[in-house]
Image (cartoon, helix red, strand yellow):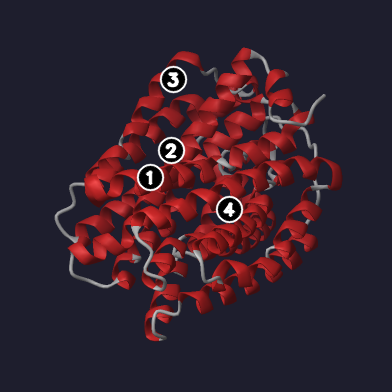
Amino acid sequence: MSWGIVGPLRDLTGSQRHTFFASLAGWALDAFDFFLFVFAVRSIASDFHTSVHAVTQGIFWTLAMRPIGAVLFGYLAEKYGRRPILMVNVISYSLCELASGLAPDLTTLLVLRGVFGIAMGGEWGIGAALALETLPAKSRGFFSGLLQEGYVLGYLLAAIVFKFFFDRIGWRGMFFVGAAPALLVLYIRRTVDESPAWLAGATTKSARPARETLVQAVRYLPRLLFLVLLMACFNALSHGSQDLYPTFLQEQHGFDASTTGTIAIVYNLGALAGGIAFGSFSERIGRRRAIALAAALSLPAIPLWAYSTSVPMFALGGFVMQFMVQGAWGVVPAHLNELSPPSVRAILPGFAYQLGNLAMSKMAPVQASFAEAHGNDYAGVLSWTIGIAAVVLVVVTLLGHEAKAAELTVGRG
């Protein structure tokens, strides 16, 4: 079977294909709504007559509230099924994005970004469980990489909107565009089936009270704690390299929206390629080795990524850096789901992911504060962040377990 994109997709049934695309789109559009805010930080600060550091608190509140969404939507998905709760989730984050565009002041906007974080926190776990419980195990590494790159597709789409439309519609208009993902619900309702693994255990799931679900989660506390540590390292690497990079390009180098958007488009294409490449490669060398290799290879890219002096070189540096960062991330959906017990798979991976987000939720404000205190030296703080995060991620990953190709079923665990 070909390991290009077409081969594995061609091997899916029609139902599996619809499920995968719905899960991918749900995560991509969720990330799209998140990164619209990232691109708008500098403009929002200007409109509300405040500092970049103050506006980056919106990133903090989004990340900090995501664990609540992971538990809330994860529990509902265990009880009522992946498909209906995914639809509720998509509508929730779309409405939050629309409301953000109407915010009259910074305080209101920050509250709305926190509520958006609850919705964002629920999407990944549900979408990953729905997709990976439906797709064939033999191609799980490939689809894990492609599914995780929904995050990159969302970033890429946000970069395109920022580049071509920001000067015309402003940051509020971008948030109004961000309400469009609600239309995805129509596709899910019409074409997507429930997870066969969830249906096989539907009687157990519908009868299980919240207390028993939480008891099941606590039962695996040591595994949860390790996964939280792992995901904290992952989130330090990704958010540390992504969330303030557009601000870095604008503040430290004076690039306009079009130039910043162009560079972002290029490095997101690199991220997309890296996630698919390392996700597929993990089928050959294992999940842990693929993650460690990608993270280690991000280190030599730091000088080109942070200290270039021309637009083409920044684009190249960003391409290489995000190829490696998202290469490591491309293994995450398969790795986390394989390490998670069947009875809590809609909760545990997503909860661990979002607790890792919580641990690193102050990353952007801290980076911005440090940079502003040192003459807008974003390059220095970005470089140190990635250098430390990559090394720690390699160590933590290799200390963990390998569960490649584990059977993904649903049951009492």
Judged from the image, the secondary structure of the residue bearing numbered disc 1 is helix
Q: Is residue 368 above or below residue 150?
A: below
Give the residue pinned by disc 2.
Answer: 29
Q: Residue placed at 18% from the left, 64% from the top?
A: 48
Of pointers 1 and 3, the one earlier in the residue sequence: 1
Label 4 crowding class (10 Å Cα cut-off): few <14, some 14-19, many 20+? many
Give the residue pinned by disc 3.
Answer: 187
Q: Quadrant of the N terminus?
A: top right
Label 2 is placed on what type of residue? Leu
Tell me the CA gap for discs 1 and 3: 19 Å
Label 4 is placed on what type of residue? Ala
Q: Residue placed at 40% from the left, 35% from the top?
A: 89
Q: Residue placed at 35% from the left, 65% from the top?
A: 56
Marks 2 and 1: CB-CB under 8 Å? yes
Marks 2 and 4: CB-CB under 8 Å? no
Disc assigned to residue 352: 4
Q: Residue furthest right?
A: 284
